[in-house]
Amino acid sequence: LAKTTQPISMDSYEGQEVNITCSHNNIATNDYITWYQQFPSQGPRFIIQGYKTKVTNEVASLFIPADRKSSTLSLPRVSLSDTAVYYCLARNTGGFKTIFGAGTRLFVKA
Amino acid sequence: DADVTQTPRNRITKTGKRIMLECSQTKGHDRMYWYRQDPGLGLRLIYYSFDVKDINKGEISDGYSVSRQAQAKFSLSLESAIPNQTALYFCATSEPGLAGGGTDTQYFGPGTRLTVL
């Protein structure tokens, strides 16, 4: 399982775009990059997943360069309710073993 | 996610007691998981099951056991609780990802906060 590295915490202000970068130097060919969001005292919630290039959904965008050694989760115009912990995971298509690291604690200020 | 429920939501118990945490799901998924989360840390996998007759250890299974009574139910037991098992416990479900379409997505329950005195 590829190890991922991401910042421990980030601060932002309402209305700003937030980019959280994740490093995964040892990513395997059949690994996908998956991001989850967790609010206090709740279970993690799936945000987005991608293999390469760019993926966008109603919540976020995910950018993965050609070498796939890193990825960036982009949250457009954050609000106070986006304050949460964000986890970057490298999961293969076998898919069942998930390593959740400490994640990135995002704090959005008014 | 309301499709994955956990009972109880909070539990305080004493060292040496046997505790069972229950998880039920209405998503129709075959795969179910139990995770543990300690303050400020990520989630660690305790056990997982791919169907009713399948039980597999995760990274921290010592001191825990599980039972998959039906597709929809997956229970976690602490045979003799100890204080360092105080944590937030999450149940999750998933189904395999589509071929060529990525990995499975896990759906988590609301968690059970367990305190062992």
Image (tube, coloured by chain):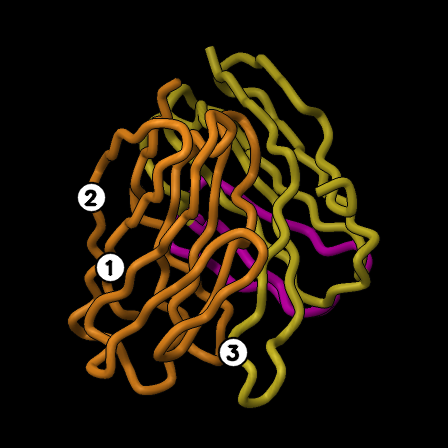
Q: Which chain letter matches label 3?
A: B
- Of all chains in the rendering, the one displayed in yellow is B
On the same chain: label 3 and label 2?
A: no
- In the drawing, does residue B18 fall left or right of residue B69? left
Is residue B52 within the magenta segment? yes
Specify the quadrant of the image occupied by residue A2: bottom left
The chain coloured orange is A
**What residue is rendered at 58% in x and 63% in y?**
B105
- Amino acid under disc 3: Gly
Instruction: Identify which amino acid the numbered label 1 is placed on.
Output: Thr
Q: Which mark is residue A4?
A: 1
Report the magenta residues as a range: B45-70
Residues at circles 2 and 1 in contact by the CB criterion of under 8 Å: no
Which chain contains the residue that carries disc 1? Answer: A
Q: Are marks 3 and 1 in contact (CB under 8 Å)?
A: no
Binning the other alpha carbons within 10 Å of mark 2 as few (below 14), some (14 to 19) or many (20 upward) gives: some
Which residue is depicted at the point 54% across and 35% down? B89
Left/right placement of residue A7 relative to residue B93 reads left
Residue depicted at x 41% and y 48%: A75
Quarter containing the N terminus of chain B: top right
Q: Which residue is mark 2?
A: A7
Kindly report the distance in space between the C-alpha atoms of the residues bearing marks 2 and 1.
10 Å
